[in-house]
Amino acid sequence: MTPRSRREYAAIIRERYAKATREAKQRILDEFCATTKYHRKYAIAVLGHAPTPAAAPRRRRRPTYGAQTISVLATIWEAASYPWSARLKALLPLWLPWATRHLPIAPGVERQLRRLSARTMDRRLATKKRRLQRRFYGRTKPGTLLKHHIAIKTEHWEVSTPGFTEIDLVSHSGNAADGDFLQSLNLTDIHTGWVETRAVMGKGQTAVRAALEELRQALPFPLRGIDSDNGSEFINNHLVRYCADRKIQFTRGRPYKKDDNAHIEQKNYTHVRKLMGWERYDSPHARARMNDLYQHEVRLMMNLYQPSVKLLRKERIGSRLTRRYDAPKTPLDRLAATPGVDAATIRALHQLRAQLDPFALAAAIDQKLSVIHQAANHRLSPRDATMPPPAVTPSVRATHAPHRWDHNWFFPKAVAQRRGGRTLVRT
């Protein structure tokens, strides 16, 4: 007897059972238990109580934002290097005027994009986010020279002016750590989040010092301090004398304590590893191409168009630690809001941002990375990075073809990043 048959049989017997006398109920129970194989106590409960009426089907609210709105949002999200929802919402006002030139955006779609909340962006982009993965990589070895001359700084920088920075090297060694290969020298300003990067061959003291001088001259504000890890590429006489001659404060973190350099560790991933991947680069041609990208498109994209959040304070309530962040802002906006910064420099940067098209910048980054990827030493690179990249054009980016997600590549699409590891939720 099927469950449905038992329910139908119980519905027929229930009305007769309710009107029967005590002796009759016993006979009905005997018959009901013999037919349904129910326990007698359970049968009493089934016949003694009316079944609960089935709940009305829950009315689900239809999506407020249509497929076209989410498609445009996903296209901007791709071009902007997959920022997490709070940053994506903050950059939309900067990108939408340019998006209307590349995409068929109706006025209603634009209004919906401006109304989208960060939480809704998370929900609607969740499927695509699950396809993006990351891994971590590093080859820093602590140095042993001059440590007693360089102060250890363990607390967070409490600065209200730009110029106090953290620096680090990102290795591009691929699967082999022997021989000379490229390193990306990354520098980030603590107050504004401004980032500058240069590629150097090896970890030689002279090359690192020369690259740091280039970064100092590229910054739109004076370099007042640097904080590094304990690698010998930083802890050496060359860099100590360099900082002393230019009145630059030089501090270092504790060995094997990456939280002491938390700002630069995050930028190592978002500004270098996401772009260059884990391939091995060990040629002067690759270094020239990487520096061309770092000096032009990447610095403009990251510093003028990419908002970031900044930790304001930590609040401890019992055993729970809550972090409070400010609103997402671009490094240029934070720099402009800082008193004492050269007004002419800020005015020139604002004019530059008004003229540049972020979608054109993203397409140029894709194209240059295709060339850089060809210059990699694929023999000593991870096995799944040898697949040639597809051609990426502005028209492909504008149409937002769904099959592009099947490659499971990071921004830009020219670098394959199919790696195991934790799911990328925000950068």
Image: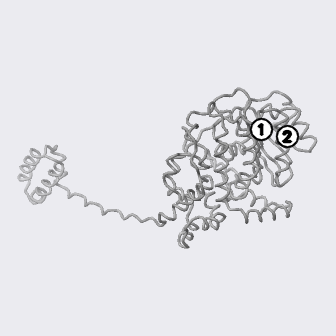
Instruction: Label 2, secondary structure: give it.
Output: helix
Instruction: Label 1, secondary structure: give it.
Output: strand
Question: Where residue 99 sits: x, y (%)?
Answer: 61, 65
Which badge, 2 or 1, comes first in the chain's sequence? 1
Question: Could you say which disc has been placed on residue 352 in the image?
Answer: none
One can see residue 314 in this view: yes
User: Which residue sits furthest bottom?
Assistant: 107
Q: Residue at x 13, y 43 (%)?
A: 37
Q: Is residue 235 left or right of residue 426?
A: right
Q: Residues within 10 Å of mark 2 (few under 14, many from 20)?
A: some
Q: Nearer the viewer, residue 368 or 82?
A: 368
Residue 161 drawn above or below residue 171 = below
Residue beneath disc 1: 200
Question: Where residue 306 sits: x, y (%)?
Answer: 68, 56
Residue 58 drawn above or below residue 130 = below
State the image quarter where residue 34 is shown: top left
Amino acid marked by disc 1: Val
Rounded to the nearest angstrom, the CA distance separating label 2 from label 1 is 9 Å
Amino acid marked by disc 2: Ala
Q: Nearer the viewer, residue 10 or 199?
A: 199
State the image quarter where residue 358 is shown: bottom right
Residue beneath disc 2: 210
User: Answer yes or no: do the residues labelled 2 and 1 have beta carbons within 8 Å?
Assistant: yes
